[in-house]
Image: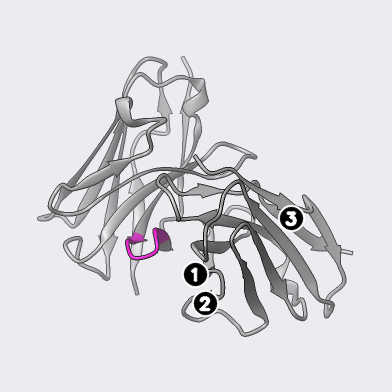
């Protein structure tokens, strides 16, 4: 069974960088694509982007200038950095396994709430 | 970016009844559409992809149909565990985008 677990600070100050890590178990990080998706409280879902273990990535154009994703194959983890955050970046952040053939997600982490506030 | 809309925003249904949820895209998707179910405090779960293919482990009471810009998710006989929010998602163009969701609650 594939499992994903997000980790990182739950509170980030405005203008700083949000950093999250996703630890994958039950699957090799090298065998699939991996995504980050977020959901502001009470709102809909927004795809942030995906990454492959080779470093090949694709980001949502609306966030591209602020997003960096990376993979650590030795730890079976992938990570998200979002710079210059504002209150609008407050959301539950999900890491997920991305089925590239269809650009859908078949396994999700439980999600982690990140609040941007001073 | 493709804009997704869903109707109705809320659907009140009695257990055992049929639920029909609609999703519309701002441009043609052919059949590049997925449906997800989300319960409070949980991550979404993939139900349908390719407009009509059920994901692994999804009961047969869930079915998807449609193509182009109009899509339907049907739950043939609602069970207690089906009361949730349902999102559609297009994957025809990057970035994938989601609809705002339809909440299915108990009548």
| Helix, strand or loop under label 3 | strand
The tally of labels here is 3
Let me know if marks 2 and 3 both belong to one chain.
Answer: yes
Looking at this rendering, what residue extends furthest in the bottom direction? B60
- In the visual, does B45 lie left or right of A54? right
Q: Which residue is mark 2?
A: B53
Looking at the image, is mark 3 or mark 1 nearer the viewer? 1
- In the visual, does A84 lie left or right of A89? left
Q: What's the residue at 49%, 76% (across, down)?
A: B55
Q: Position of residue B23 (x, y in %)?
A: 67, 57
Q: Is residue B9 above or below residue A64?
A: below
Label of residue B50 in the image: 1
| Helix, strand or loop under label 1 | loop
Marks 2 and 3 close (CB-CB < 8 Å): no
Q: Nearer the viewer, residue B40 or B57?
A: B57
Label of residue B103 in the image: 3
């Amino acid at each position: 069974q594939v499992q994903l677990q997000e980790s990182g600070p739950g509170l980030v100050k405005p203008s700083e960088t949000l950093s999250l890590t996703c630890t994958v178990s039950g699957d090799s990080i090298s065998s699939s694509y991996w995504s980050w998706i977020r959901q502001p409280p009470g709102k809909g879902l927004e795809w942030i982007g995906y990454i492959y273990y080779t470093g090949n990535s694709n980001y949502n154009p609306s966030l591209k200038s602020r997003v960096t994703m990376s993979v650590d194959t030795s730890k079976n983890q992938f990570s998200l950095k979002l710079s210059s955050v504002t209150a609008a970046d407050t959301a539950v952040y999900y890491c997920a396994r991305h089925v590239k053939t269809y650009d859908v997600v078949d396994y999700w982490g439980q999600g982690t709430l990140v609040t941007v506030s001073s | 970016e493709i804009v997704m809309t869903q109707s109705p925003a809320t659907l009140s249904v009695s257990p055992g009844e049929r639920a029909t949820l609609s999703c519309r895209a701002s441009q043609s998707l052919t059949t590049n559409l997925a449906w997800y179910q989300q319960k409070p405090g949980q991550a979404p779960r993939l139900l349908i992809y390719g407009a009509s293919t059920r994901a692994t482990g999804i009961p047969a009471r869930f079915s998807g149909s449609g193509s182009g810009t109009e899509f339907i998710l049907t739950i043939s006989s609602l069970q207690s565990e089906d009361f949730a929010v349902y999102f559609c998602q297009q994957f025809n163009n990057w970035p994938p985008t989601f609809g705002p969701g339809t909440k299915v609650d108990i009548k």
